[in-house]
Amino acid sequence: MTTLKFDIDTHGIAVLSIDVPERPMNVLTPELTSELKDAVERIATDASIKGAIITSGKPGSFVAGADLKDLVTAFDKGISAAEGAKFSYELSMLFRRIETCGKPFAAAINGLALGGGLELCLACHYRVLLDAPKVVVGLPEVQVGLLPGAGGTQRLPRLIGIMAALPLLLQGKQIKPAEALKLGIVHALGTAESVLSQAREWLLGSPSAEQPWDNKKFKIPGGAGPMAAHAPQSFVAGNALTSASTHGNYPAPPAIMSCVYEGTQVPMDVGLRIESKYFGKLLSGPVARNLIRTMFVNKGAADKLAMRPKNVEKSKVQKLGVLGAGMMGAGIAHVSAKAGIEVVLLDATQEQVDKSKAGIAALQARDLKKGRTAQDKIDEILNRITATDDYAKLEGCDLIVEAVFEKREIKADVTRKAEAVIPESAVFGSNTSTLPITGLAQASKRPKQFIGIHFFSPVEKMPLVEIIVGEQTSEETIAKTLDYVGQLKKTPIVVRDFPGFFTSRVFGTFTQEGLRMLLDGVQPALIENAAKLAGFPVGPLAVSDEVTLTLQQSIFKQQDADGLADKYRGLIGRPVVDKMVDELKRPGKRFGAGFYEYPEGGQKHLWAGLKEAFPPAKQQPDVEEVKQRLLTIMALETARCFEEGVVSNPIDADIGSILGIGFPPWTGGTLSYIDTLGPKAFVEQCQKLATQHGPRFEPSEWLVARAKAGELFYAPQA
């Protein structure tokens, strides 16, 4: 299978055009690497070839880097650090051959160049980049738990200086052509029609085939090593900032720092060996596997609606009805209108919907001020939204999303009113976070077209949508709902009906475990800081304040009424909620007081009165134990969801736990966390915590049996 087209023009210039078959973008496959190696040797040894241009046969895309679907299997295959280093070094040596073979190479970068694609360009002696809105360059490997393993940590600092290179390497930032030119990453910009001719023109000028760093007089811009003027800022402060942001959970950033620090003090060839050594350690570890598998491979499949029923024709929502103009309803209306959908935003009063639409306009005005949008686009979005209190305006809607208060009787009332107007073919979705969809569907005349569509707040920022399938929900309804989520460019997961579904049920164990710790006498600051050290975005007390303790209390009461209190093992923190709301009158952030103080114009901080309200124990637990309690209770509840059929595959569980409820990404998600520890080790961890803290940590017989059999949630990759 040919991946590389080799032509020689009348001037003796070889043009290598990369076009990997059956791929929307070029990636560095083994076939491409092999063909490129042969081509480079031909250029280096053929006296009639004066130089070479490397470009892409796919317009708008040069090379998007390594094939992550290959790299994701490395850990499961048991690849060693030495084998990982060898993989990196072989590609690195190919690129090194390009820059030292004695023939000048130019990169005509006619589209985005990321990761190994940009590293290939950096090995060329001249780089001209297409100047187009969708074109970016960058080294994003850190985002998948790796580092650039084909010279990126060595060439970029030598090219633009360590201070300029480190942020790009550590953040994986993708930059536009103008910035790439300004930084000196590329030599020139061009059009789609000119990049090839500009590269050829440079080669015809008989340029040097030596890279700057191969000249004996070369010095890295700004210096390198501990004596460089920038060293205190780049390395001392940089290491501290890296440690503070990763908490030791992500090994790639410190590895990148080490590569740059060590590698830039030695010759290029030694630096490349250093880089490969660190790359091998990362590739052979679980964090890279977890990040690649969940956040890129599986999320990418979910974004393409991989779970959509295949036997249903594709659909598109033209007109959407949103019932309830609160914060959630307004957010749903906003993102839908931005996606080009006509929206009817409805609430009990015209005053409420007008206020809600004004809030959407304010958000758009803020984006305008920051240069993220234009006034004509704002006008288009707002014109798509009809704010009304008249149900008759729902006529012709393809889909309804109900986002009213979490009470059955209110939801039943708006369901009946909307169904009296909307077409027979319309889908009705309830944006509920806890109430069972099958029960809510009892108010509907068409339960087969009733489904749960659970958005997360704030809707404009949160990427996940949880689709909840009721007992009677049809496959056509599932497909139509997924098509709508696809229109919004959000990531869907599909779960089965159960009180709390998947995300709310698992998230509840996180908040309730934090509250239980207060009752156990754990210091509030230890609870919150341990959560952050584990990789959660915020601690359980802070997030309880955000969602409000009154909401939690109302959910408890609803569970009591439904006879579900025993089913929810997370109610162990209920005494804290009742005390904070009923006795201490501190129901959360929205009310100005909760576990935290919210001084006007100041920074929030833990309420000093917590010490008296929940006296701390003399003996405090180790921070690792607190981290373990939070991680384990959520992973264990996910396993229960899997056992009970609430989630039918580990992919939805892992994506949902990270994107929806903030489970640390380094784990790969709740079920990947279990697999990474190993089923046997996880069950033993649960049993130990059950002995120390109660039966909520006790694993089920089903999970114990899986552990004995060594059964993983993900089948090992062959």
Image (tube, grey):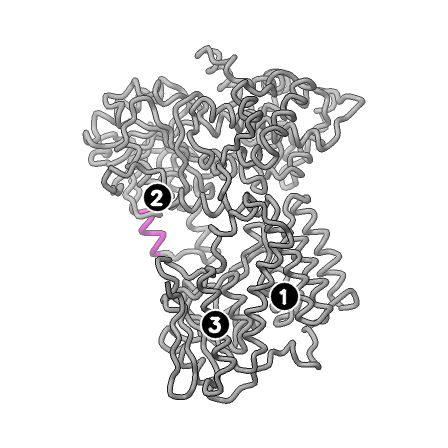
- x 37%, y 68%: residue: 57
Residue stretch in magenta:
376-383
**Disc ID at residue 486:** 2
Identify the residue under disc 3: 38
Q: Is residue 309 above or below residue 94?
A: above
Within 10 Å of disc 1 (Cα), the crowding (few <14, some 14-19, many 20+) is: some
Residue 607 visible in this rendered orientation of the protein: no
The image position of residue 153, as x and y in percent, is 62, 63
State yes or no: discs 2 and 3 in contact (Cβ < 8 Å): no
Q: Secondary structure at mark 2?
A: helix
Q: Quadrant of residue 323?
A: top left
Q: Amino acid at mark 1?
A: Ala
Q: CA distance from mark 3 to mark 1?
A: 35 Å
Ranked by sequence position, the earlier of labels 3 and 1 is 3
Q: Is residue 205 magenta?
A: no
The image position of residue 566, as x and y in percent, is 52, 12
- Left or right, residue 598 beside residue 459: right
- x 49%, y 58%: residue: 66
Identify the residue under disc 1: 164
Q: Nearer the viewer, mark 2 or mark 3?
A: 3
State yes or no: discs 3 and 1 in contact (Cβ < 8 Å): no
The image position of residue 53, as x and y in percent, is 45, 77
Q: Amino acid at mark 2?
A: Gly
Quarter occupied by the N terminus: bottom left
What secondary structure do most residues of the magenta stretch adopt?
helix
Q: Quadrant of residue 389?
A: top left
- x 49%, y 75%: residue: 40
Q: Amino acid at mark 3?
A: Asp
Q: Quadrant of residue 260?
A: bottom right
The image position of residue 226, as x and y in percent, is 78, 64
Q: Nearer the viewer, residue 501 or 455?
A: 501
